[in-house]
Amino acid sequence: LWPLVLSFFLILLITGCIWILWRIIIRQKKLETMKNDFISNITHELKTPVAILTATNEALLTFGGSKDPEKTERYLRLEQDELHKLQGLVDNIMALTRLEHNDEPQETLELVSIPMLLKTVGARFSGLPGVQIQTAIQVAREELLTQPAALRTVLSNLLDNAIKYTPSDVKKIMLTVTESPQHYRFIIRDYGIGIDKAHLPYIFDKFYRVSQGNLHTVKGYGLGLSHVKSLLNRINGTINVDSVPGQGSTFTIELAKR
Ligand code: ADP
């Protein structure tokens, strides 16, 4: 009987290994396809701002900017918008490169003032139409030791998402800082489209985007949250999400106190 039981377990083991290997291959293939799509989409998207910048610049050079200040200003504003788009695309490409090579720039630890940090991050979004960011700081000591640029990027990415995925005209977002004996907690709450439970385990994966709701009108490449996760790894942080479709999402970051 023993040889039979043994061969049964052996077959089970081999089948298990083949299955795991198969899953890894499929996942690799899927990632490869998503990466190729990313490259072809981003290349395509680079074309439009470059074409607009070339045309406006040619026009400015041809009619001589100083002769018509109003027209010049219109053209320069157009150029500024397109340059912002280009910057966003370049940021995405750089985020992917860093993720792939795991080479986030290392920073030294600095004592960061929490009110200043929230002010700096909030300022990037304050001019956007309808955006209302409410902050609350509920900690005994309003300073923490961390890598400031990494933490700023994490918070900016989460606020950016909170705004992107809130379709209403008024985009209310709460950014609260609390603490426990071992951690600082940064809580970002939005009242946007929310995320279905089935998608929650995957949203931190590279290239993952929820294929529902108003997604087609929201630009993105599914890199923001994986970038956030990799930055948090570096600064001893974790992230969790709670979400109710139609009601909004809450992302909670925990940073270990140093
Ligand atoms: P991107 O926003 O570029 O698609 P992310 O990695 O930042 O990529 O997010 C992955 C996906 O998670 C998004 O495509 C979106 O479906 C979902 N998501 C992220 N943040 C939110 C949010 N605050 N509200 C609703 N959905 C969100």
Image (tube, rainbow, N blue to C red):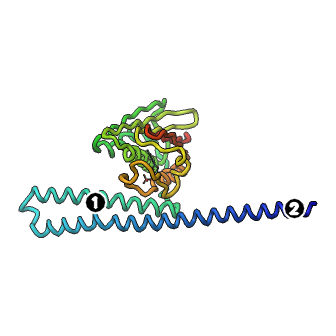
According to the image, label 2 marks what residue?
6
Q: Which amino acid does label 2 sit on?
A: Leu
Query: In the depicted view, which residue is nearer to us: 90 or 12?
Result: 12
Q: Quadrant of the rendered structure where residue 44 is?
A: bottom left
* Viewer can see residue 107: no
Residue 150 position within the rendered picture, expressed as x and y whole percent measured from the top left: 46, 50
Q: Of label 1 and label 2, which has the lower sequence position? A: 2
Expressed as whole percent of the image width and height from the top left, the position of residue 252 reads 50, 40
Tell me what residue is drawn at x 9 percent, y 67 percent.
Answer: 63
Residue 82 appears at what percent x and percent y? 27, 59
Location of mark 1 (residue): 83
**Res 93 → quadrant:** bottom left
- Crowd class of label 1 (few under 14; some 14 to 19; many from 20; radius 10 Å): some
The correct choice, above or below, for 17 with respect to 139 in the image is: below
Q: Is residue 109 left or right of residue 12?
A: left
Q: Residue at x 49, y 40 (%)?
A: 243
Determine the CA span between mark 1 and mark 2: 66 Å
Give the side of residue 218 with respect to residue 78, left or right.
right
Q: Tell me which amino acid carries mark 1.
A: Leu
Q: What kind of element bears circle 2?
A: helix
Picture mark count? 2
Residue 80, above or below 50 = above
